[in-house]
Amino acid sequence: MTQEKVKAILDALAAAYPDAECALHHQNVFELLVAVVLSAQTTDKSVNEVTPALFAAYPDAAALAAADPHDVEEKIRRIGMYRMKAKNIVGLARKLQTEYGGVVPQDFTALTSLPGVGRKTANVVLSVGFGEQHIAVDTHVFRVSNRIGLVREKDVLATEEALMRTIPQDRWSHAHHLLIFHGRNCCTAKKPACKNCCLQGLCEQQL
């Protein structure tokens, strides 16, 4: 795909979704990290429903590190895989306390060493929390980017690397949010709304 077409796609998405940004509610990088870990295979809306009480009880890494995982489970019971997620967020808080002074590290390798933190979560934290340019590939980004023809890859890591080659670096983070919004609102998994799509004439599936 030519750079002109890539730009046209990103511009069309930006016009369609002017408010595209991280949908997880958070007040700081620590809350963002926890929220992203909780969001795995769960909607952001569901996470936003449980995090106010969670963060009120455990406002920082020190408080969460001292928590009983069973008490944390009760606060996040409404989201999927809550037992494993409770174990992970308590574990990451404890590691933040023992190895990073309770501060979320601005480093990809350090982030991915934390319980429950993979490439996607680390990329989101570095992008949204620290303002770096990153592309985090979730199910929406993977589906939409391959469906419309930005890339043609068969797995998440290859898609991330291909998108980094295809999209100008200064647009990586915004492109991530745009693709998510398009995946949620139009280019859905089961029934994409192609007739109402802002990418008509640009999407490979429609040509």
Image: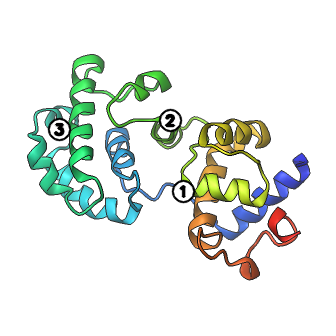
x then y, percent, for residue 117: 39, 35
Q: What residue is rendered at 35% in x and 29% in y? A: 104
Q: Point out the tag, 2 or 1, that comes first from the N-terminus.
A: 1
Give the image quarter of residue 197: bottom right
Residues at marks 3 and 2, CA–CA distance in whole angstroms: 23 Å
Q: Which residue is mark 2?
A: 119
Which residue extends farthest bottom? 195
Q: Nearer the viewer, mark 1 or mark 3?
A: 3
x then y, percent, for residue 61: 22, 34
Q: Which mark is residue 21?
A: 1
Q: Secondary structure at mark 2?
A: helix
Q: Which mark is residue 64?
A: 3
Q: Image check: 175 left or right of 78?
A: right
x then y, percent, for residue 100: 30, 20
Give the class, few, some or many, for how many residues have Cα within 10 Å of label 2's Cα (few <14, many ≥20): some
Towards the viewer: 104 or 204: 204
Residues at marks 1 and 3, CA–CA distance in whole angstroms: 27 Å
Q: How many marks?
A: 3
Give the image quarter of residue 121: top left
Q: What residue is rendered at 64% in x and 67% in y? A: 17
**Residue type at tag 3:** Leu
Give the class, few, some or many, for how many residues have Cα within 10 Å of label 3's Cα (few <14, many ≥20): many
Q: Point out the tag, 3 or 2, that comes first from the N-terminus.
A: 3
